[in-house]
Image: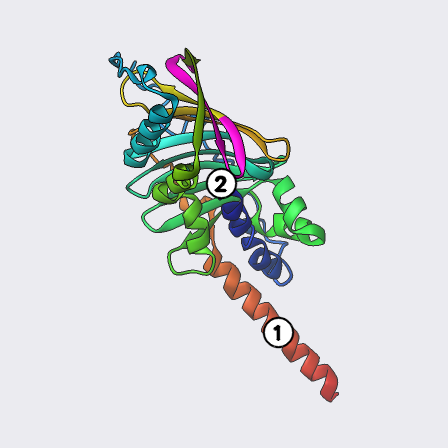
Amino acid sequence: MRIMRGLASATAVCALVVGAAACGDNSDDSTGRAGNLGRPDNPNNPDKPEEPKQEPNGVEKLTASEIVDKAMDAMEQASAFRVTGTGDESVAMELALDDSGNCQGTVGKEGAETKLASKDGKIWLKPNGPFWDMFAGADADAAKTVVGDRYLLLSEGQDGYSDIAETCTLSELTESFTSGGDDLDATNKGEVSEVNGVPAVEVSYEAPDETGTMWVSTVGKPYPLKIVLENDSKPGAITFSDYDKPVQVQIPPDDQVLDMAQLEELATAGTSSGTSADAGTGSA
């Protein structure tokens, strides 16, 4: 999977924040706390009506290989889904994405995480304290002071935007799960059980770099509902839900947002001031 690449890209904002922390005026409370808007447990409507009953699709009657092929084809055609779990390198995620570019959730590692939202060419990030501690090192406290309880805003065209946006792009994330399907060997078909209340057939598989088990829905479209990686070095468990349901992104209010362009200006001003000061000291 490529989730780790997205997280690594997201942490690139640390450099700008740390640079701004070195030259910003930290005595002004306006640069600090601006409320505590958080992502809801469910990025979609938690009061959504009960789903209509789905008809059996008969996928459990196919061979293991045919089931996997059906699942991968269905996932590639999905217009939206939510992915939750832990993948390679202990990267944890809960992201809801759709093909209109909407995305909301969290991505992190070992308790260091950032809330993430994307809509209309803009990305909002809200790292937690452990995130700064892990990725900003000795400058973590300065970064926390500058950002406070606000979201960081990246707009299309700004440095780092495209890399972070990849994590929130449905087609990119889908490819990370479905690529390499031709090299996947479905070895065994198991029994039908349930994944979050949905009946699913179990299929074991082997690939050049991983071994795992997949559960595929036996009602409605044959979507993959769960994948468990069984490698000793890269274990993981991921569930999929909310297929084909548009994501309703909750955008934070303007007074709870710090535009990365502002941080770039602060960092640039601070660098210029420092250079001037050094030059003045040298000429004295």
Q: In what element is the residue under mark 2?
A: loop
Q: Position of residue 39 (x, y in %)?
A: 46, 33
Question: Relative to 136, is 199 on the left or the right?
Answer: left
Question: Is residue 131 depicted above or below 281 in this figure?
Answer: above
> Local crowd at mark 1 within 10 Å, few (<14), some, or many (≥20)?
few
Q: At 42% across and 37% down in the image, what residue appears?
A: 177
Residue type at numbered disc 2: Met
Q: Nearer the viewer, residue 177 or 168?
A: 177
Residue 210 is one of the magenta-drawn residues: yes
Q: Quadrant of residue 73?
A: top left
**Circle 2 crowding by C-alpha within 10 Å: few under 14, some 14–19, many from 20:** some
Residue 1, disc: 2
Q: CA distance from mark 1 to mark 2?
A: 44 Å
Image quarter for residue 200?
top left
Task: Work out whether residue 273 or residue 233 is closer to the camera in this orientation and state it.
Answer: 233
How many numbered discs sit on the rendered protein? 2
Q: Which residues are magenta?
A: 195-212
Eye-nearest disc, 1 or 2: 2
Colour treatment of the image:
rainbow
Question: In the rendered image, is residue 247 in sight?
Answer: no
Q: Which mark is residue 39?
A: none
SS for tag 1? helix
Image height of 251 relative to 222, above or below: below
Front-most of residues 10 and 198: 198
With respect to residue 115, does 69 lie above or below?
Answer: above
Residue at numbered disc 1: 273
Q: Disc 1 marks which amino acid? A: Ser
Q: Position of residue 117 (x, y in %)?
A: 42, 41
Q: Where is residue 216 drawn, in percent x and y?
A: 38, 21
**Which secondary structure dominates the residues rendered in magenta?**
strand
Question: Residue at coordinates 48% horizontally, 60% vertically from top-left?
Answer: 262
- Residue 138 sits inside the magenta stretch: no
